[in-house]
Image: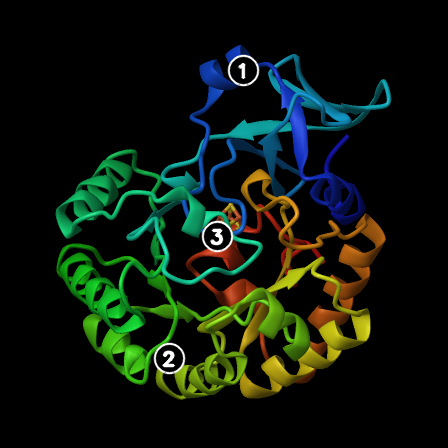
Amino acid sequence: MDMNAEIKAMLVSIGSADIDEALLRETVKTTIPSAGPGAGLESFFIKSGGHRVRLSINKNSPLKVARCCSDVVVIKDGKPIVTGQLEPALSHCPDQAYLTISGRCIYDCKFCPVPKLDGDVKVPDEILDMVEEARRTGRLKAISLTSGVEKSPEEEVGKAVSIVRALRSLYDLPIGVSVYPTDTSSEELKEAGATEIKYNVETMDSEIFARTCPGLSLEYVLKSLEKAVKIFGRNRVSSNFILGLGESDECVLTGVARLAEMGVIPILRPISPHPLRKGEVKVERPSAERLLGLARATRKVLEDNGLRADLAETMCLPCTGCDIASHRDV
Ligand code: SF4
């Protein structure tokens, strides 16, 4: 009973599962994302039928994961729905060292727990040690960096640039970076040796953006994405676009088209309601049907614009754990 796009969409729309921690511990390391909308929740990966899904661990989830011979089975309403293998994460996700530089942020995007977590700020040597530890497993295919904004976007980009430069002198691997842009971030990161870049629009509904990301500018992110394509090239620039903040499908499709016309690959990311943000933002996890419909439409828009999401080598596009990904899932 292999996973297909429909089953994955159902799993992603639920987003969590109840799993025996002993089973998890004996098979794989769990992962606790320290940046982005899923930060702070423990999760695990299942691969099956050429698809991968990340589920957070939740005792009250309608999904239950149990051992089944050498595989695991996902059960819903007492019925098995898919079998697969638990997949170990390297640093955050399979095959990649995906590391957070600053686990804190001066901004206050209403869906994001990072400003409330007051997490670690890693010094370059810590990042280099973690990447080296991942490399020693023999499974490291890419290095990805993300960061909250500890003091200013300029200072954060400066930290990312020096870490990328150090990593580039040590590793012949693709390096991806996701930060809040500055006037010179694309030039500086490219020159330091980054392969791919992600600046997140978060939403393309300007009203929702203004309400949800106070202090940030959607127009500035869009301008920065346009410039990033000139510097990094097509199929090398992506942007997270959150689903579930109250945006309409029409807004999503118009936004996807605008990004694709610029040469940017949108990543449609289902919102993960976080307990630290309870009551601050109205969120609705998208249904399986919505996820599939929008993913299929996005694939078509990408193809109409000569883009391929499966050429990306770093960050979320090759991982696919949290999304229904164009060219990999549909
Ligand atoms: S899709 Fe992105 S956020 Fe999700 S597990 Fe993979 S790398 Fe992490």
Residue at 41% across, 43% down: 117
Q: Secondary structure at mark 1?
A: helix
Residue identifier under label 1? 21
Return the x and y of residue 289 as percentages of the image width and height. Answer: 84, 54
Return the x and y of residue 228 as percentages of the image width and height. Answer: 40, 82
Residue 186: quarter of image: bottom left
Q: Tell me which label, 1 or 3, sits earlier in the chain.
A: 1
Residue type pointed to by label 2: Phe
Q: Tell me which label, 2 or 3, sits earlier in the chain.
A: 3
Q: Nearer the viewer, mark 2 or mark 1?
A: 1
Residue 306: quarter of image: bottom right
Residue at 20% across, 41% down: 132
Residue type pointed to by label 1: Glu
Residue identifier under label 2? 232
Location of the C terminus (image quadrant): bottom right
State whether label 3 is within 8 Å of ligand 1: yes
* Marks 2 and 1 in Cβ contact (< 8 Å): no
Residue type pointed to by label 3: Gly
Residue identifier under label 3? 36
Q: Secondary structure at mark 3?
A: loop
Image height check: is 253 above or below 322?
Answer: below
For this view, does 178 lie left or right of residue 76? left
Residue at 68% across, 54% down: 324
* Marks 1 and 3 in Cβ contact (< 8 Å): no
Residue at 50% across, 56% down: 316
For this view, does 110 lie left or right of residue 30? right
Q: Secondary structure at mark 2?
A: helix
